[in-house]
Amino acid sequence: MTNYHLAQVNIAKRLAPMDDPIMKDFIDNLDKINAIADKAEGFIWRLKDEDKDEAAIVFQDDTFIINMSVWETLETLFNYTYKSGHIDVFKRKKEWFSKMKMIHMAFWYVPVGYEPTFQDAKDRLDYLNKHGDTPYAFSFKSKFTFKDALNYKQL
């Protein structure tokens, strides 16, 4: 048993308010996607009752939808993202969200039992956008380990 898990954040910028007809199919699929995550191998935790006011303050944008979760490993997160029913909705993201110029997904390691905060998520995204993939904040392109993260000196 390890003493760390993998945290992830991804943000998306809505094309319309949540009650707009454009967003209906996205809203209608949320319970399905969340149920797939909750039952996925390696799933630990996900943000459920998002505090929109706090997220808007931290990210300085109230049109962002923010998803955070914790997984046993990078592999289990990858399998959920690309090898489960999640992919069917993921492929439709252009229907509901605008293309972002910045990197909008980041991963990092957390101690077992830790639930990442909005500030943690923003810090990792900002770092990844500034420095690229490092053991402090990375993407699926990199396969950094917890040991890499422990030995990494932030720039």
Image (tube, rainbow, N blue to C red):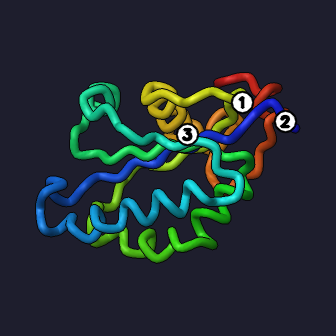
Q: From the top left corner, tell me how far across and down residue 70 is, in percent.
A: 61, 42
Mark 3 residue type:
Leu
Question: Is tag 2's residue or tag 3's residue first in the polypeptide sequence?
Answer: 2
Label 3 element class? helix
Residue at 46%, 57% in the rendered image? 34
Seen from the viewer's position, the closer of residues 80 and 139 is 80
When asked about the image quadrant of residue 96, the answer is: bottom left
Q: From the top left corner, tell me how far across and down residue 89 is, in percent.
A: 42, 72
Query: What is the distance, in whole Å, between disc 2 and disc 1 at their CAs?
Result: 8 Å
Question: Is tag 2's residue or tag 1's residue first in the polypeptide sequence?
Answer: 2
Seen from the viewer's position, the closer of residues 151 and 83 is 83
Question: Is tag 3's residue or tag 1's residue first in the polypeptide sequence?
Answer: 1
State the mark number for residue 49: none
Q: Quadrant of the C terminus?
A: top right
- Crowdedness near tag 1: few (<14), some (14–19) or many (≥20) residues, C-alpha within 10 Å: some
Label 1, on which residue?
A: 112
Label 2 element class? loop
Label 3, on which residue?
A: 128
Residue sitting at the far left: 20
Label 2, on which residue?
A: 2
Mark 1 residue type:
Val
Q: Please give left or right for residue 4 compared with residue 85 in the image.
A: right
When asked about the image quadrant of residue 150, the answer is: top right
Q: Are marks 2 and 1 in contact (CB under 8 Å)?
A: yes
Q: From the top left corner, tell me how far across and down residue 60 is, in percent.
A: 27, 31
Q: Is residue 103 visible?
A: no
Query: What is the distance, in whole Å, between disc 3 and disc 1 at their CAs?
Result: 23 Å
Residue at 45%, 63% in the rendered image? 33
* Closer to viewer: mark 2 or mark 3: 2
Q: Are marks 3 and 1 in contact (CB under 8 Å)?
A: no
Mark 2 residue type:
Thr
- Crowdedness near tag 3: few (<14), some (14–19) or many (≥20) residues, C-alpha within 10 Å: many
